[in-house]
Image (spheres, rainbow, N blue to C red):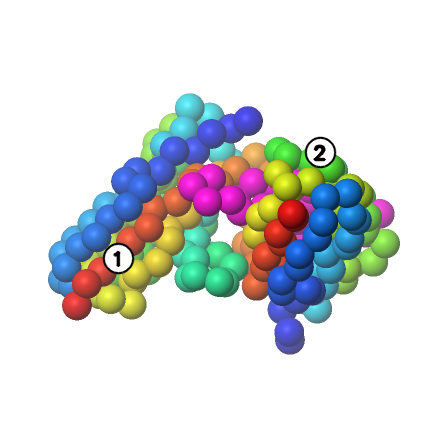
Amino acid sequence: NAGVTQTPKFQVLKTGQSMTLQCAQDMNHEYMSWYRQDPGMGLRLIHYSVGAGITDQGEVPNGYNVSRSTTEDFPLRLLSAAPSQTSVYFCASSYTRDSPYEQYFGPGTRLTVT
Amino acid sequence: TQLLEQSPQFLSIQEGENLTVYCNSSSVFSSLQWYRQEPGEGPVLLVTVVTGGEVKKLKRLTFQFGDARKDSSLHITAAQPGDTGLYLCAGENFNKFYFGSGTKLNVKP
């Protein structure tokens, strides 16, 4: 199993550009989520999904969109990048059949918006 | 926002010393997790505690969930350089996870 994979690993965007961060998992996990990690602030939940076709907002959803058309993939879209979105982005997945969740994290995408 | 505060923020100790990291909140959580994160990598789950008062041990690491399910502690006995990293606590309610800001631990040989 590859686990949770994220692409790209690094990205530089100009203000106003759009892009999609990719996340995929091969563990048949129902639950997937996106976080951003800023210095001194831990991880903050952006969006999450408890299964294909179902998404919901986390703590900091503004400026980001998600969709979940398959169990495996959970892309995060930045519609119009802003310097405040400079951060490291992590995708995670877990089963929901078992409680509590045990999240597996991807290696992260480091995004810089200039 | 359900805030989790971790203390201390930074800890630098000698190999062989003991240490405790605290994770406190005014919110009640269904479960609480501890992660360790190395530079340039994603967090890795160490343990999940669910029941108030629960204590779990993982080799030299002891985790405790407060009776009221609002706080937790991580105690490391005889720390080793391999324990160096960022330790994060995370509380879960209704499918959402709330992370503390982390404790950066450095264990010197």
Q: Amino acid at mark 2?
A: Asn
- Of all residues, the one furthest to the bottom in this rendering is A1
On residue A78, the disc is: none
Crowding at mark 1 (Cα within 10 Å: few <14, some 14-19, many 20+) = many
Q: Quadrant of the N terminus of chain B?
A: top right
Q: Which residue is mark 2?
A: A62
Q: Quadrant of residue B68?
A: top left
**Which secondary structure lies at badge 2?**
loop
Span highlighted in magenta in the image: A29-53
Q: Which residue is mark 1?
A: B106
State the image coordinates of residue A18 (x, y, percent, origin top left): 79, 49
Instruction: Specify the subunit that label 2 lies on.
Output: A
Residue at 35% x, 38% y is: B6
Residue A20 spot, x, y in % from top left: 77, 54
Q: Is residue A9 left or right of residue B10?
A: right
Residue A29 seen from this side = no
Q: Amino acid at mark 1?
A: Asn
- In the image: residue A8, left or right of residue A38: right
Residue B8 visible in the shown view: yes
Residue B57, horizontal then vertical, whole percent = 31, 56
Which chain letter matches label 1? B
Q: Specify the principal SS of the magenta part.
A: strand
The reply, left or right, for residue A14 in relation to residue B58 is right
Local secondary structure at mark 1: strand
Discs 2, 1: same chain: no
| Magenta-span inclusion, residue A50 | yes
- Figure label count: 2
The residue depicted at 42 percent of the width and 24 percent of the height is: B26
